[in-house]
Image (cartoon, rainbow, N blue to C red):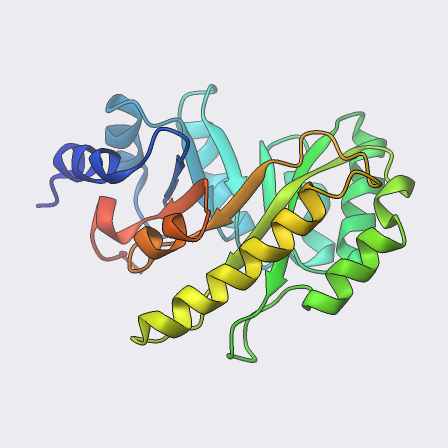
């Protein structure tokens, strides 16, 4: 039996005040999410559209849902207006679809742009060059119903913590370059989402202020 309450307390004790916890709830049953809610957690992250839509009606309405998985363009409409934030915007095309669907629904959708620096080819996201070109060319100015709140990134899947730290450092460097560029006049670009169960402490050391933790809270997933 997983001690969810105890695990939440342990994790929260390790987080600096400026770091926000997103509880990653994918593949965990509604009962476990309800227990986490009763312990005070309000931000939950799902990575599959159908699972999010299944769980959401069964849980309190004040939960702030974040979508953190690869989002297919044909499923965007299903979650617009239902999520607090989409953290995994990995192409300009997807960003524009989110903007169009948000405008159609009459809502403003908060997003993070996903930056790919890890060595695995399987991970999605903007390259550093693509990301910098997007901001240099002021691609955000065409958005009518989408607010870019920051960046999300993952480190390489390695036991080599120096490599992991290097990946996070590069994501943080890009975040700070964009955030501190006065020419862009960005407002509310203040979230750097990095770090999961096995590497969140390293991510925080490299500047993360938003960590995505599942296994350390809820144990192994139930597939």
- Regarding residue 96, the answer to whether it shows in the image is yes
- Residue 197 rendering spot, x and y as whole percentages: 30, 54
The residue lying at 40 percent from left, 47 percent from top is 212
- Residue 11 rendering spot, x and y as whole percentages: 23, 40
| Above or below, 79 relative to 156 | above
- What is the quadrant of residue 43 in the picture? top left
- Residue 108 rendering spot, x and y as whole percentages: 74, 29
Q: Quadrant of the N terminus?
A: top left
| Above or below, 33 relative to 63 | below
The residue lying at 27 percent from left, 56 percent from top is 222
| Above or below, 107 relative to 51 | above
Q: In which quarter of the image is the C terminus?
A: bottom left
Q: In the displayed structure, does residue 171 sit left or right of residue 143?
A: left
Of 223 and 131, nearer the camera is 131
- What is the quadrant of residue 185 in the picture? top right
Q: In the displayed structure, does residue 41 sit left or right of residue 174?
A: left
Q: In the displayed structure, does residue 80 sit left or right of residue 21?
A: right
Of 136 and 69, nearer the camera is 136
| Above or below, 44 relative to 115 | above
């Amino acid at each position: 039996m997983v001690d969810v309450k105890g695990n939440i307390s342990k994790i929260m004790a390790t987080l600096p005040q400026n770091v926000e916890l997103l509880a990653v709830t994918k593949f965990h049953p509604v009962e476990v999410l309800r227990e986490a809610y009763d312990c005070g957690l309000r931000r939950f992250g799902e990575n599959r559209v159908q699972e999010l839509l299944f769980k959401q009606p069964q849980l309190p309405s004040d939960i702030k849902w974040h979508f953190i998985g690869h989002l297919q363009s044909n499923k965007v409409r299903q979650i617009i207006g239902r999520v607090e934030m989409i953290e995994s915007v990995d192409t300009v095309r997807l960003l524009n679809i989110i903007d169009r669907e948000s405008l159609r629904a009459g809502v403003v959708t908060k997003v993070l742009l996903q930056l790919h620096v890890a060595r695995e080819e399987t991970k999605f996201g903007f390259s550093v060059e693509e990301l910098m070109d997007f901001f240099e060319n002021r691609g955000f100015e065409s958005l009518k119903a989408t607010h870019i709140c920051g960046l999300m990134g993952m480190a390489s899947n390695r036991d080599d913590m120096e490599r992991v730290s290097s990946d996070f450092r590069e994501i943080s460097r890009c975040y700070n370059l964009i955030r501190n560029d006065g020419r862009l006049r960005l407002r509310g670009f203040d979230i750097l989402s990095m770090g999961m169960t096995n590497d969140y402490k390293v991510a925080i050391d490299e500047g993360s202020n938003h960590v995505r933790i599942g296994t350390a809270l809820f144990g192994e997933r139930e597939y």
